[in-house]
Amino acid sequence: MLTLTKDRALALALLLIVAVMWIASGDIRPPTAWQPYGSALFPRILLVVIGLLSLLILVRSLLVKVPEQAGLGTRINEWFQRRRTILALFLLFGLYAALLPLVGYIAATLGFLIASFALLMGIDTRRKWVINLTISCTLAIAIFVIFRYGLNVWLP
Amino acid sequence: MTNFFLQALTEVGSPSVLGLILIGVLFGIIGGSIPGFTVTMAILVVFPFTFAMDPVSGVSLMVGVFVGGYSGGIVSGVMLGIPGTPSSITTVYDGYPMAQKGEPGRALGIGVAASFLGTLISVAVLVFFGPLIASFSMNFRPWEITALIVFALTLVAGLSNGALLKGLLAAALGLLITTVGYDRNSNLRFDFGLPALGSGFEILPVMIGIFAFSQLLGNIEKIKDEGHDAKKVDTNVTIPYGQIIKDMAGQKLNTLRSSLIGSLVGALPGTGGTVANFLSYDQAKKFSRHPEEFGTGTPSGIVASEASNSAVAGGAFVPTLALGIPGDLPMAIMMGVLILHGITPGPMMFEQNPVLVGAIYASLLIGAVVMVLCNLLLVRWFAKISLIPQQILVPVVLMLCAIGAYALNNNLFDIWVLFIFGVIGYLLWKAEVPLTPLILGVVLGENLERQLFRALELNDNWLTFLTRPLSALFLALAIASILFSLYQDRKIRRLKQAAQQENV
């Protein structure tokens, strides 16, 4: 059984993307008399280049001997375990993007900042809470005021 | 040109623009002095604030960030022994030992003076070579521009940490990103049934997402892995002005050489401040009568490092303004800023927007003066700010990135673009794919496609790219850069294997 290394995962993921985009490029309007090269040619050239480079990376990664490692499931699990904080931060950012139009800038930003600070700094002492809330409130309001009144940019 | 420069100077000299340069420089120094924050990140954070400004104000603010950012690495380098930006790594070699010997003020003063002179010399290089190269490149037709973009991309890809294949892959991915949405012929591509994809991806959320997420989350991972804690540092610094003047008087040649190296390296695609400070430090050591003093706290080491990395700012503007091709990441973002303000960098800019070109020169000069004053007067505060922990910095910057992406078009979809490219950037970074060629591809993609097909519409023979001398030269250089990178990759691999065998 082959081990899924970084390079192999990258090459396989890109080959999949190339395949999907190649099929999608079939929907692009074909060349006409006044557009002899059409709009699909440039992305197709790039897809060929990306496909070839991905294949080269895959072949090269297969030539390198990789020591036997734990099963794929275990390794994926380990990967996620080690990056729990990063994944949580991504999740918080996704939530922030989703909540912005629903609850508005101030509430969403306060929520995102407080939750992110709590995640990264911890919430085990009163001092950390004070720092967290002070920075979150000051920044959220200051940025709103600068954009809304200083730069005339409406925030949601 | 003199008239335009004077007109630009009048505009830049207005109190509001001077205030913006001051803010830019301050923020740049802060950004440069916080380890792991980098000049690029400082530019990305400030950039959304320019949306509502006129081009001169916006560009002046950004130039201020550039000048401040390239000098900001001195503070953390000298006080903490940690380079604030990769372009000030060699500053630490001599700045930190000098500070440890009880002379932090002297180290900072020398660094700031060298930064100032480096910026001035690089502006002279820009003023002289910018219009010269621009007037030469006015003769470039679509074949030459296409070949030049290909050359710039291969060069940057080849210089990416010895990972040529992944560098080229990244550049091609960057170009592919620009093919989403309506093209030059109003044909829809890769919208996957989503109306929001019809107008394609805005360059800026893509760039911010790819760069900022990987950088910031990488910093968080580093803290978790290494258990970094903020150092306790004595930020009480006095600057010995007399001593610094004496030190700098003995560094004339070193300052000039290092500034010219910085300007030249800045003008070359794919290099930037990091290469500049290593190259110039190495040259200063070779030319020195006392090479053994390097690394122990000699003024020559600080001057070589700081003059060269600050000179990158002016040098890097040369290809961006004269050819429309940014050489490094901060310049790619600067080009995005100019495009957003409706200005297309390139040779025509010198004809169509001479006042703006003059404003860039003037902002660089004024920024250099402001940088010296800020660094000397506020060094204690910068040293304190540089201790801000990443745990506080990261959420704040992510929030500013989101607001910046939204404020671009008052469009929430751009925040999702930022988020999705953030995830992609992080995964690519984990897979050790260099991100600079990708961002350069995103910036240059549209122009490459336009120029390629304009060339083919004028002459449908693909061989014309090889029969026109300059176009052939650029393509030959592109191939040569790939071959050179292959050679370098092999050499690095052979050295690694030899080192492994020795260890066994």
Image (cartoon, rainbow, N blue to C red):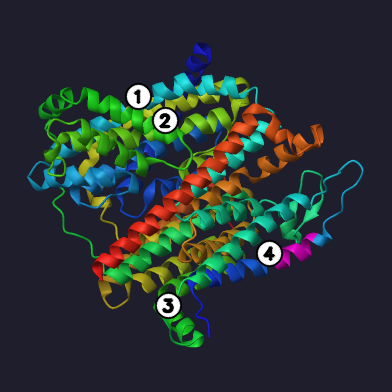
Give the mark, 4 or 3, whose residue is nearer the N terminus.
4
Residue at 22%, 23% in the rendered image? B252
Q: In the rendering, at what x and y percent does residue A29 appear? A: 86, 54
The mark closer to the camera, 4 or 3, is 4
- Determine the secondary structure under disc 3: helix
What is the residue that sits farthest to the right in this orientation?
A: A33
Please tell me whether the stretch drawn in magenta is mainly helix, strand or loop. Answer: helix
Residue type, numbered disc 3: Arg
Distance from Cα at disc 4 to Cα at disc 1:
47 Å
- Residue of label 2: B314
Distance from Cα at disc 1 to Cα at disc 3:
48 Å
Is residue A24 in the magenta section? yes
Rendered position, B357 above or below B163: above
- Residue of label 4: A18
Same subunit, labels 2 and 4: the answer reads no
Q: In the rendering, at what x and y percent does residue A39 appear? A: 80, 50
Q: Tag 3, which chain?
A: A
Asked whether disc 1 touches disc 2, contact meaning CB atoms under 8 Å apart, the reply is: yes
Residue at 87%, 49% in the rendered image? A31
Q: Nearer the viewer, residue B240 or B294?
A: B294
Rendered position, B215 above or below B325: below
Q: Tag 1, which chain?
A: B
- Determine the secondary structure under disc 2: helix
Q: In the rendering, at what x and y percent does residue B351 appear? A: 61, 20
Q: Residues within 10 Å of mark 2 (few under 14, many from 20)?
A: many
Residue type, numbered disc 4: Val
Distance from Cα at disc 2 to Cα at disc 4:
40 Å
Residue at 56%, 44% in the rendered image? B153
Q: Residues within 10 Å of mark 1 (few under 14, many from 20)?
A: many
